[in-house]
Amino acid sequence: MSDIRAESFDRTVARSWDVIEDRIGEIEREVFGEDAFDADELRAAFTGRQSLAVLLRDGPLLIGYTQAGRARAPDTYYIANTAIAKSYQGRGLIRVLMERLYADVRATGAHFIERDAAIANGYADKIVRFHAADIVRTRDHDSPYGRQRFIRMRLPET
């Protein structure tokens, strides 16, 4: 790995979305194919007033991202989307992204994270194993994206 780092996305900077929009769309389509969010959904997710987003870069190259917004439950953020370019997957980079996101969520004063994670590819099991001490509740359910596991957890300590 070279200069891989996570950075908080600042939606308040003029044209910040315009700078990353095309690359975010490329990664989204590469990772999710037909299930990818469209440009308008991604713009809303990244630029919403209560949205948090983290970008993952290898030097100047944008290679991944995650995005969360306020959940219905108080004191909680919901991770709506996480993607890392396929050529960078399997290197443990999700941890780099999540550590930055957790710090940003903590800075809002929230104490919980919620998300849905795919069961078929083992991702849900990995999250539950890694965060076992922080898990509050899980529930498996069907979704348009296949079988998912809803996960509610305490925000991990730094």
Image (cartoon, grey):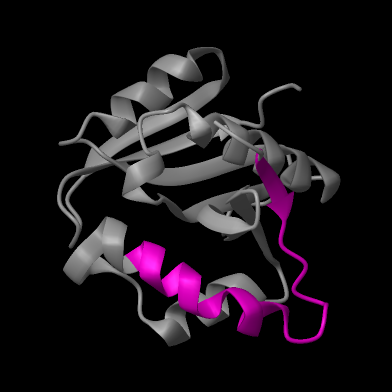
Q: Where is residue 137 in the image (x, y as percent from the top left)?
A: 44, 29
Instruction: Please tell me which residue is depicted at 35% across the width and 73% down the height of the picture.
Output: 37
Q: Position of residue 27 (x, y in %)?
A: 39, 62
Residue 23 lies in the magenta-colored region:
yes
In the rendered image, the vertical position of residue 123 relative to residue 78, given as above or below: above
Judging depth in this view, the residue of 44 and 143 nearest the camera is 44
Q: Where is residue 94 in the image (x, y as percent from the top left)?
A: 50, 35
Residue segment shown in magenta: 4-28
Judging depth in this view, the residue of 32 and 118 nearest the camera is 32
Instruction: Please tell me which residue is depicted at 37% across the width and 65% down the height of the picture.
Output: 28
Instruction: Please tell me which residue is depicted at 60% across the width and 71% down the height of the picture.
Output: 46
Instruction: Please tell me which residue is depicted at 47% across the width and 17% down the height of the picture.
Output: 130
Q: Is residue 63 left or right of residue 89?
A: right
Q: Is residue 28 left or right of residue 114?
A: left
In the rendered image, the vertical position of residue 16 relative to residue 138, given as above or below: below
Q: Can residue 123 be seen in this view?
A: yes
Quarter in which the C terminus is drawn: top right
Quarter in which the N terminus is drawn: top right
Residue 85 lies in the magenta-colored region:
no
